[in-house]
Image (spheres, rainbow, N blue to C red):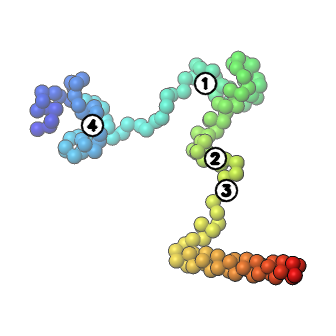
Amino acid sequence: MSPWVARGLDSTDSRSPIIEWSRASLRSLGLPHTIGGMNLKSQPATRGRKPNPDSKSGQIRTLLASGMSATDIAKKVGCTPALVYNVKAAAAGKKRGGGATAKRGPGRPRNSAASANMNGLAGILDAVKNGERERVQLRAALEKIQAVLADALS
């Protein structure tokens, strides 16, 4: 017997605790994925609200699709050109699929080729050998500098 039926609650009761339960807890109890006409398996994963076509942004989207320039759209809708460019950029971000998180900030390095070459033990050994070679070269340069300074001071 399910826990809410034992307490005198059914799935149509507004006080039913089933609304707060997750899919995993429902599966662990052996319950179906549909409860009270609500299908828990196929709920769309949409974020935010639906765009309103009557809002200024909605009007801007439709006019952008028609091919008007940003200044003409701003005059027609009664907004600033900056809003037109913001709506245009937001729409372009959705098409790319990345949005703001996919952009790189100024000064942020690209993925280094060194990390791409670290494939297994051979890549690690190559990196250690390169580091050792650079250390030897720098050591030789320091010794030459010390010799020049010693000659200049004596």
Q: Along the line of sight, which residue is nearer the eye, 21 or 84?
A: 21
State the mark number for residue 103.
2
State the residue at coordinates (17%, 28%). 10
Give the CA separation, mark 1 to mark 3.
37 Å
Q: Which amino acid does label 4 sit on?
A: Trp
Task: Give the mark nearest the N terminus, 2 or 4.
Answer: 4
Task: Give the mark nearest the N terminus, 4 or 1.
Answer: 4
Comparing labels 2 and 3, the label whose residue is closer to the camera: 3
Comparing labels 4 and 1, the label whose residue is closer to the camera: 4
State the mark number for residue 58.
1
Q: Is residue 135 left or right of residue 143?
A: left
Q: What residue type is labelled 2?
A: Lys
Instruction: Judge whether 14 appears above or below 114 on screen.
Output: above
State the mark number for residue 21.
4
Give the CA separation, mark 1 to mark 2.
25 Å
Q: Which amino acid does label 1 sit on?
A: Gly
